[in-house]
Structures are given as structure tokens and as C-alpha cells.
Amino acid sequence: MEKFIIEGGVRLEGEIRVSGSKNAVLPILSATLLCKGTFRIDNVPRLNDVYTMIELLKILGCDILWEGEKRLLVNSERAEKYVAPYEVVKRMRASVLVMGPLVARMRRAVVSYPGGCAIGVRPIDLHIEGLKKMGCHVEMKEGYIHVNGENLKGARISFPIKTVGGTENLMMAATLAEGETILENAAKEPEVVDLARMLKKMGAEIEGEGTDVIRIRGVSNLRPCDYSVIPDRIEAGTFLVACGITGGEVAIKGCIPEHLRAVIDKLKEAGMDIVEGDGTILAAMRRRRPFACDVSTMPYPSFPTDMQAQFMALMCVADGVSTITENIFENRMLHVAELKRMGADIRLCGRTAIVRGVEYLSGAKVMASDLRASASLVLAGLRSSGITEVSRIYHIDRGYERIEEKLKALGAKIERVKDEDMAARKGI
């Protein structure tokens, strides 16, 4: 097992470049199952979730090769299998995104119930109900979802709540369905739009991506394409918070500022100076402490749930009292107990955290519970006095590409160490 050792109190300065989006690349890789041929996918981040998706695609018959640091070649010529096994799917919820492409191309899919972070139930019933409306027969057997799509056809599907994965899965299934599919109350996230753009480059007929209503007219076949993944807006947002929590001055390169509008607005409210450029955000926290401000998570374009934990870390050292409300997932406050170990003053009331900012946090041994919680603990460690040890950092490796190297480039004192190395240092 590995952990981060962080010596806080360093003001971050310099520039970093954002990696490709985790939440965009996973459905894009799944989409390579829709037709035979070789895809060249650029700006692919080297993340554990990406490695898991590659493993799953190989099980389904794809041949995959890294070409350089950021490009993946995916050959789906021999992808004829349609069973996504529990051993792989349990490690990552996004594995369920192969279901739509498999049903579209092979008219069948057998997919294990997904796993992932323990931040909530996150049922996939909306995916399943959508496939049923499209004429599929769906059965649950021994922990697997069995889908027969021989009668796959277009349908009007109105989601009762926003669902990113459901929108992506059904959009991919609809590309090769007979007739037109209309997705109402569709997710509008940039990652959904990125997938739609790739599908259209493959020959799909899609309109309305980025709005509440997406229309997909099924076509008889698709073709492989070359595609470059958008930058990761959550990584960019995390580094903006790192700048703010340390009182630093940082340039975020290779990002799309418009994808971060809600986050940028809140950081400005907290006292950060931000200048947006073409693919660049220049940020500086010139006050010693940020102002307290309230946050309530909602689907895009509102404040993202994937930035809630990081923003809470910032509010822990803010001047004043803030409230942070989590409206997306019912169990996404697991970082609160760990932040309190570092001296944070937080009171939980259901899904709302009342945070009374303190001037200083103190280093402690803390444990990550999920991907974004781990990021919040790293951020808190950057502002703490003394040494912070963050364990179970395999969570952060799911969604951040070499985060410690990027932070060190900005001046942070952070090291990745193995447990046995720590034991050797202590003479155990």
C-alpha cells in the first residue's frame, strides 16, 4: 500500500497542464465497441480507471496499444464477446457503459452490477428502464444484467432525474437502433457532449447534445475515427482550489474555462483573482484566507458534486461560516470525519455540512474513502502545519494523473511512499 506524506505551509506557484478527462475518456473508450476497426484516441490520461476499462475491452476482444504517452490505439475487429465479468466491473462503476454499445452492435449484453466509490447507491435502473423502452428484454440473474436487444428500436425516454451514465449508455445504444430515440431531461455535462461529438464523427446522427433534449436517429453502421479527449475540468478545479487554500498563484494550462463556470464563480466569491484566457486560467489568492461562501451541488452547469469535497477543504480555512449541501449522492460526506481529525470545525446536518473556518489546520494521519475525498485530504494537508499522512491513495490514482508530481512542480512538499518504506524510516 502507498500513502502521501505532505509537509504543509508552502504557497503554490507556477503552472501545470491539465490531463485528459477521466469522465469523458471512459465512455469514449466504450464507444469503440460500436463498430469494427482501429480507433486513435488522443489525450488519454494514465489513470487506474483507464487501465480497468482497457482490461475490460481486452476481455471483450479488443486489441489495445499505447502509442506514445497519451494516445491509445483500439482495434475492435475481434471484439465479439459480450460478457463483462464481475471481477473487472466490481472495481469501477463506469464499466456498465459497455452495455449500450454491446446491445447496439451485438444485440446482446451480459454485464455484472457495477462497483466504484462508496459515495452512494447510484442505481442503474434508469439505464435498464431506458433499454426496455427501446424494445430490449432485460433479466437479472446471479448479479448480472442480461440484455437481449434483438428488437432494439428508437423510443422516447424521459429521465425522472438527470443521469450522466444513463444518457451516455442510451445514446450509444440508440446510434444503431431502428428509428429515432429522444432522450428528455438528458444530462448536459461536457463529457456527454464530448461523447456525442465522437459518435457523430463515427457517422452517428445526433443533435441537441448539451441541452435537455437529445435526438438520435439510428443508422445502419458506424465507422472508426480518430478523436482527442477534452481536458479534465475536475482536475483543473482541484488545482484552482490548491492555489486558493495555499494562498498561491497558479496558471492552469490546457483547460476549458467555460466548463468550470460554476466553480470559478464560487472561487471568485471566496476572494480569488481569476483571469481566463484561451485554454488557460490564471489564479491568485491574494488574501491570507478565503471568504466563507455557501455551495449546493446540482447537475451541470451548476456546482459539480465532484468538486464538493475539495471546496469543503477550502472552506475549512475560510474566514466565516459556510454551508455545503450535497444534493447528488446520499453518502458523499465521508471526508468530514477525516477533515475534523485535522482540526476542521464541521457539523453535519443530514446532507448539509456547516463549516466554521479556522485559521490553521494541523497535520494528521488520515484515510481516503473515495476519489474526491482523497483529493480534499491532500488539499487540507497542503495548508496544515506539520506532517499529514494520507493513506489508501489508490482512490486518488483512479482520477488524478500523477497528482503529486504536478503539485511538486508548483512547490508543494509531497511524497508518495510505500508502507514498508515508512516502516524502514521509523526503524520498525
Image (spheres, grey):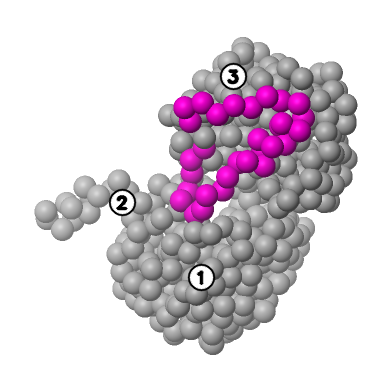
N-terminal-most mark, 2 or 1? 1
Q: Nearer the viewer, mark 2 or mark 1?
A: 1
| Residue 138, image quadrant | top right
The residue to which callout 2 is attached is 417
Identified at 68% across, 46% down, the residue is: 164
Disc 1 packing (10 Å; few <14; some 14–19; many ≥20) = few
| Residue 203, image quadrant | top right
Q: Position of residue 119 (x, y in %)?
A: 49, 54
Whole-number angstrom distance, CA of label 2 to CA of label 1: 36 Å
Q: Which residues are magenta?
A: 114-143
N-terminal-most mark, 1 or 3? 3
Residue 97 part of the magenta segment: no
Q: Amino acid at mark 1?
A: Gly
Whole-number angstrom distance, CA of label 1 to CA of label 3: 41 Å
Q: Residue furthest left?
A: 428
Looking at the rendered structure, the number of numbered marks drawn on it comes to 3
Q: Do residues under tags 2 and 3 come within 8 Å of each other at their CB atoms?
A: no
Disc 3 packing (10 Å; few <14; some 14–19; many ≥20) = many
In the figure, is residue 174 to the left or right of 25?
right
Identified at 31% across, 51% down, the residue is: 417
The residue to which callout 3 is attached is 82
The residue to which callout 1 is attached is 350
As rendered, which of 234 and 309 lies closer to the eye? 309
Element under disc 1: loop
Q: Do residues under tags 1 and 3 come within 8 Å of each other at their CB atoms?
A: no
| Residue 329, image quadrant | bottom right
Q: Amino acid at mark 2?
A: Val
Q: Nearer the viewer, mark 2 or mark 3?
A: 3
Q: Nearer the viewer, mark 1 or mark 3?
A: 1
Q: Relative to 383, is 146 above or below?
A: above
